[in-house]
């Protein structure tokens, strides 16, 4: 993040969010760059696999460190996020990897199941913060171009004008935008989902 922030506030917020079994040691190397040391594998997995994490709306990007590489040269651009492909046809479930790869690097997918509610298919993708978010994914099958909207779970703040993370639309340009310019709106998935119902009158 480009804005100044308190390292102490950052450490306290993340420790509370992670709720680890043992204390994690965090060392500041330079502005916006830290090294963390974990005392147990379970805590390491919680932090590295349980994200995405964010602080004040900005993504917290974490990568393994071997102790031999110069910390300033470790690439910190990507993080994993669960995304929902909305209204995906059951016949296309075998194409999920191809659809997810258009969002970022494919990591995993949730097996197709009737055990959960919601008109979507969950995939885990590795996003690169240097590029805009994708608001949809698509596939060509049988000569037809099918487009499916995408929603991201626990998404950090993003700009509804340009699709980039790290700022919001009121910080883009002069901050004044007509509704038609907010082409990347509604990308964050709701925390919970429920079935939509409709009562039809017999009259």
Image (tube, rainbow, N blue to C red):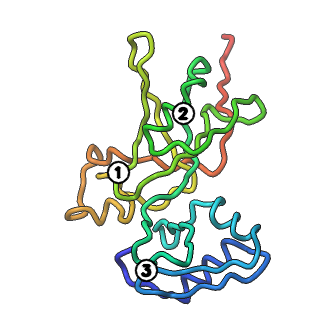
Q: Is residue 30 above or below residue 185?
A: below
Task: Name the residue carrying label 1.
Answer: 132
Tell me how far mark 1 sits from mark 3, CA to CA: 22 Å
Mark toward the viewer: 1 or 2: 2
Q: Are marks 1 and 2 in contact (CB under 8 Å)?
A: no
**What residue is shown at x 39% (from left), y 19% (from top)?**
145
Tell me how far mark 2 sits from mark 3, CA to CA: 34 Å
**What residue is shown at x 68% (from left), y 71% (from top)?**
18
Q: Residues within 10 Å of mark 1 (few under 14, many from 20)?
A: some
Q: Quadrant of residue 80?
A: bottom right
SS for callout 3: loop
Task: Name the residue carrying label 2.
Answer: 97
Q: Earlier in the sequence, mark 1 or mark 3?
A: 3
The percent position of residue 85, horizontal first and vertical second, equals 54, 35
The disc label shown at residue 32, or none: 3
Q: Are marks 1 and 3 in contact (CB under 8 Å)?
A: no
Q: Is residue 77 above or below residue 120?
A: below
Q: Residues within 10 Å of mark 3 (few under 14, many from 20)?
A: few
Is the C terminus in the top left, top right, bottom left or bottom right quadrant?
top right
Q: Residues within 10 Å of mark 2 (few under 14, many from 20)?
A: some
């Amino acid at each position: 993040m480009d804005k100044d922030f308190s390292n102490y506030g950052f450490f306290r917020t993340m420790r509370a969010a992670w709720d680890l079994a043992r204390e994690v040691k965090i060392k500041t190397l330079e502005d916006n760059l830290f090294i963390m040391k974990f005392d147990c594998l379970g805590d390491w997995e919680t932090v590295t696999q349980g994200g995405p994490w964010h602080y004040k709306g900005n993504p917290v990007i974490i990568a393994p460190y071997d102790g031999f590489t110069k910390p300033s040269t470790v690439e910190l651009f990507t993080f994993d996020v669960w995304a929902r492909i909305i209204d995906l046809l059951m016949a296309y479930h075998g194409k999920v990897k191809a659809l997810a790869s258009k969002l970022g690097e494919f990591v995993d997918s949730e097996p197709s199941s009737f055990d959960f509610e919601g008109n979507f298919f969950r995939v885990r993708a590795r996003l690169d913060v240097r590029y805009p978010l994708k608001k949809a994914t698509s596939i060509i099958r049988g000569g037809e171009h099918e487009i499916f909207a995408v929603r991201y779970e626990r998404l950090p703040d993003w700009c509804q004008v340009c699709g980039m993370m790290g700022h919001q639309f009121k910080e883009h340009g002069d901050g004044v935008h007509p509704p038609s310019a907010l082409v990347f709106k509604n990308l964050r998935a709701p925390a919970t989902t429920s079935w939509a119902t409709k009562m039809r009158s017999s009259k």
